[in-house]
Image: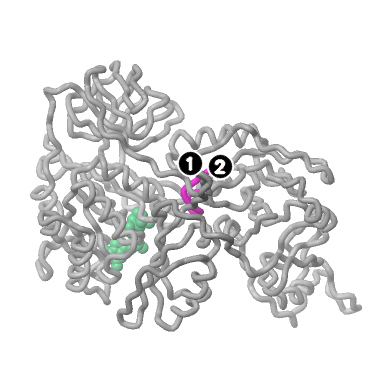
Amino acid sequence: MEIRNIAIIAHVDHGKTTLTDALMKQNGGLQDENISMDSNVLEKERGITIYSKNTSITYKGTKINIVDTPGHADFGSEVERVLRAVDSVLLLVDSVEGPIPQTRFVLKKSLELGIKPIVVINKIDKPASDPHRVHEEVLELFFELGANDEQADFQTVYAMGREGKAYKNLGDDSSDLSPLLDVILENVLPASLNEDKKMSAQVFNLGYDNFLGRLAVARIYSGKMFSPSQVFIKNEKGSRAGKITKLFTFDGINRKEVAEVSSGDIVLLAGIPDIYIGETICEDESVEQLPHIAIDEPTLSLNFLVNDSPFAGREGKFVTSRQLKERLEKELEINVGLRVEFSPMLAVRVPTQNFLASGFKVYGRGELHIAILLENMRREGFEMQVSEPEVIIKEENSIKTEPYEELVIDVPMEYSGTVIEKIGKRKGIIKNMLEKQNIARIVFDIPTRGLLGYRSEFIIDTKGEGIMSSRVTDFGEYAGEIKKREYGSMVSMVSGKAVAFSIANLQERGIMYIEHGTEVYEGMVIGNVLKGGDMSVNPTKGKQLTNMRASGTDEALSLSPPFVLNIERGLEVMSEDEYLEITPKSVRIRKKYLTELDRVKMQRNKKVSLP
Ligand SMILES: Nc1nc2c(ncn2[C@@H]2O[C@H](COP(=O)(O)OP(=O)(O)OP(=O)(O)O)[C@@H](O)[C@H]2O)c(=O)[nH]1
Ligand SMILES: [Mg+2]
């Protein structure tokens, strides 16, 4: 059977997964309305794709392998890898928003690899949809990114992914996605069938199975792959022998075990425990290695530590450093952007507190990348505390460098002044600015360090009307000191239950993270202080009057809703001398040193710094 291999790429939310699901319903034998490519619990909950996934459909006797990719910039390097394994892409563009930052990034990568994309202008059912304008904008973007003549002569299809309909021309009649599938068959080259040559394949993604161990997703470029079979694995460092014990192909949302797979297809294979991205799997040592696939370096690091807060062990099932270590080791099997330093184990005995803070240093690709890992762990029953994420700063020949990002902001004109000023303070430099229909699009170059913690401020400053999106471009010269926070922390100096009466007073000073009835401990951060530095307070103090209510509540008090911490918010607002405590049920910020006395002492004598 002929094979076509494509990936679906776009900016976040432009409808990749919805379209993939619709294709599976139409031609992939998927009957259950509730099954989606976003199958992971977090993906379902957040409505975003975190992991790229494979599926296949059959149309007019041709097998089409489809890779649905994540749109969020933190997972951008995953998209790059996928592009190496496919022959074409569907570039989805929302018919209202037009091409936005991640569209640009994924298109640029595709063009560089010589791919000729098919453009799908999607969501044309939206009332404000303007497919003609968007088509123009896409064409401009192709030219701007240096598309060659052939690439710029792309095919356009219009779609309503959610309704499972596509149109070759606006105004056509259509009852399904066949017009899109026809364009795919006409425009994407069949995967070459070098079946008579020796087998070679390249790994572009990893997977894990509790029984089979590490799995590899690979594209076969020539020959046939068999199960079981002896193979060679090649990388830049050399070659080694290995054995394939199981082979699967993608069949709709399922995988189908097979004994052999031909050139051109995408397979999932088991049996090689140390297989890695970019490696060539081949029949014998004489087969040439395929060009290397680069993996983006981590940009952030933070420490994962055993939870030692006064509430430690109350809610979690897995709390020891050994359990943390095993979990992180398992994560490394599939999480390609992640790195962990297991040794030396971070361990510091705190003289005044008599505990041992122990854990590991973890490196990741961005705040969301790390937050997803932490979220998965807490759901599995883990409890831990983490330090503030720090940007990785490199030093070569005594020149300090740090990661920089391209930040693209769309804001109503009236907010652009505030945004420019704030980003300027964070060492962002304007590269480009454009105004269209009273919306300013500003492109900045900014150190990742300056961007950390800015997202929630941006939402407030633009009253939720701004869109920001960024991606790491490269390491550049260290930008000097950046003051991240303009506020202090409100810290509880007692343990007990917070009462409304105190909160009503404290909320005059800042934003509260807790509400009436929240259990607090000494050293826990319960809010921020908008002016000035840290402040120690007692949130458990009730009204000392005879008419005090037993519960401490009082109808006359008007409490603002608290800023409920979650992992991402916590990582953004915490400061250097704090930990984010994460358990299956709670997310809290706490001071590394719980008592005020210790904090003062440690400030004076900076010898003991906690990991
Ligand atoms: N109006 C309209 N909405 C759509 C259409 N297709 C998808 N959506 C909606 O757009 C939102 C995002 O859809 P997804 O398919 O999850 O987008 P995605 O591109 O996979 O997003 P990421 O994987 O997070 O990058 C969902 O709320 C969909 O219901 C469409 O054709 N029309
Ligand atoms: Mg998706």
Q: Going 53% across and 46% down the picture, which residue do you hit?
A: 398
Does the numbered disc 2 mark a residue whose Cβ is under 8 Å from ligand 1? no
Q: Residues within 10 Å of mark 2 (few under 14, many from 20)?
A: many
Residue 221 position, x and y percent, is 20, 31
Q: Residues within 10 Å of mark 1 (few under 14, many from 20)?
A: many
Which residue corresponds to mark 2?
Answer: 362
Q: Quadrant of the C terminus?
A: top right
- Residue 36: tell me if it is visible: no
- Image height of 575 relative to 132, above or below: above
- Image height of 321 relative to 450, above or below: above
Q: Are marks 2 and 1 in contact (CB under 8 Å)?
A: yes
Which residue corresponds to mark 1?
Answer: 338
Mark 2 element type: strand
Mark 2 or 1, nearer chain start:
1
Residue 41 position, x and y percent, is 46, 48
Query: In which image quadrant can residue 168 be found?
Result: bottom left
What type is the residue that disc 2 sits on? Val
Q: Going 69% across and 55% down the picture, which residue do you hit?
A: 578
Residue 90 position, x and y percent, is 22, 53
Ligand 1 appears in which quadrant?
bottom left
Query: In which image quadrant can residue 557 be found?
Result: bottom right
What type is the residue that disc 1 sits on? Leu
Examine the structure image and report whether residue 63 is included in the region drawn in magenta: no
- Residue stretch rendered in magenta on the structure: 362-370
Q: Going 40% across and 79% down the picture, which residue do you hit?
A: 412
Label 2 – label 1 distance at C-alpha: 7 Å
